[in-house]
Image (cartoon, rainbow, N blue to C red):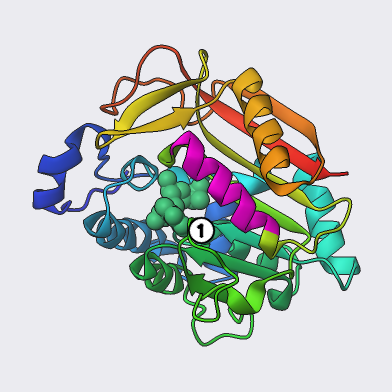
Amino acid sequence: MASFAPPKADIATAEKWYEASTTVDGPFRDLLENYSHVPTDDVVKHVVDTRNRAWAVHPYPCLGQFRFLELNLSQRGDLYNRLLKELKTQPGSRFLDIGCCLGQDIRKLVYDGAPASSVAGAELNGAFIDLGYDLFRDRDSTAGQMVIVSANILESPTGPSSPLHSLVGQFSAVQLGMLLHLFTWEEQITAFENTLVLLRGQPGDRIFGQATGHLDGTPTASVGSRATFKHNAESFARLVAAAQEATGTRWRIVTAELDNGLSVFDGKRTWDDPRTRRLVFEIERE
Ligand SMILES: C[S@@+](CC[C@H](N)C(=O)[O-])C[C@H]1O[C@@H](n2cnc3c(N)ncnc32)[C@H](O)[C@@H]1O
């Protein structure tokens, strides 16, 4: 494992979940070598250097622990295969990754054959969007011509000045990847309402993702003093019911499961407790 100097000021902030280096193997290495054309011997240094710059923007555990290397969307088996097939073969299909950070999942879809025009990203922090272009070296390439906007999903996309305005009604599938647990219950409803506006509004529209979950389905004061909500399957079903009520739409829960995936308690994050799990979900409009 190569080792590079981490940014010292940020280690002091969140050193528990800062890993100085990593290996880069499998599909992520393939992506960097064959989509981004990073020379084999430069891959690890390129990843660590870019990650360190991203860490300086905001010390998310997914950056500190190199979790973005896991390409979570592509690990969802049948869901990923169906999505990819739709994007490749159905002209009306389009995918939006909200809270996309470095944008690894949309690059993976394009590398696997989805047209760049069929995928898009939205990310609160524009610095992460820029770092994503640096990481994947596709700012000026044909493959990299996907739309990625700096936007807050808690703000309405319908206002004429919204960066999401031109994307209203465009998508058949939306991912909320490691995002919901950053929001309170009320904010999660708002995020659902705004996501709905970005979807086509047809039966079969899908929202999926993962989030830090909790065996008890409970609010926790994990982000400052705000009581952000971490779900179990039951509380997620209540959220969907409340979102249905708020929007007058009907949704079927395809998947809402807790597992021991990447958010499981490892004692390294300040908000971890032994009942922390990962929530994996998919809902479909009826
Ligand atoms: C924990 S990271 C997950 C990144 C990526 N989806 C993944 O799974 O690797 C959460 C991301 O959501 C973004 N984010 C946070 N609040 C947001 C908001 N209100 N609207 C859009 N993006 C947001 C953060 O800037 C960050 O990049």
- What residue do we see at 27% from left, 53% from top? 58
Main structural element of the magenta stretch: helix, strand or loop?
Answer: helix
**Front in this rendered view, residue 167 or 29:** 167
User: Exactly how many numbered labels are in the figure?
Assistant: 1
Q: Residues within 10 Å of mark 1 (few under 14, many from 20)?
A: many
Q: Is residue 186 magenta?
A: yes
Cβ of disc 1 within 8 Å of ligand 1? Answer: yes
- Residue 108 coordinates in the image, percent (x, y): 63, 60
**Front in this rendered view, residue 74 or 192:** 192
Q: Is residue 1 magenta?
A: no
- What residue do we see at 44% from left, 13% from top? 275
Side of 80 relative to 54 (left or right)? right
Q: Quadrant of residue 56?
A: bottom left
**Quarter of the image that includes the N terminus:** top left
- Residue 118 coordinates in the image, percent (x, y): 73, 71
- What residue do we see at 65% from left, 62% from top? 96
- Residue 229 coordinates in the image, percent (x, y): 46, 30
Side of 142 relative to 251 (left or right)? left
**Quarter of the image that includes the C terminus:** top right
Q: Amino acid at mark 1?
A: Ile
- Residue 26 is at least partly visible in this image: no
- What residue do we see at 53% from left, 65% from top? 122
Side of 246 relative to 156 (left or right)? right
Q: Which residues are magenta?
A: 184-196
Q: Quadrant of residue 126?
A: bottom left
Residue to which mark 1 is pinned: 153
Name the secondary structure under disc 1: loop
**Front in this rendered view, residue 184 or 88:** 184
**Front in this rendered view, residue 126 or 220:** 220
Q: Quadrant of residue 265?
A: top left
Task: In the rendered view, tell whether residue 264 sits above or below residue 243.
Answer: above
- Residue 228 is at least partly visible in this image: yes
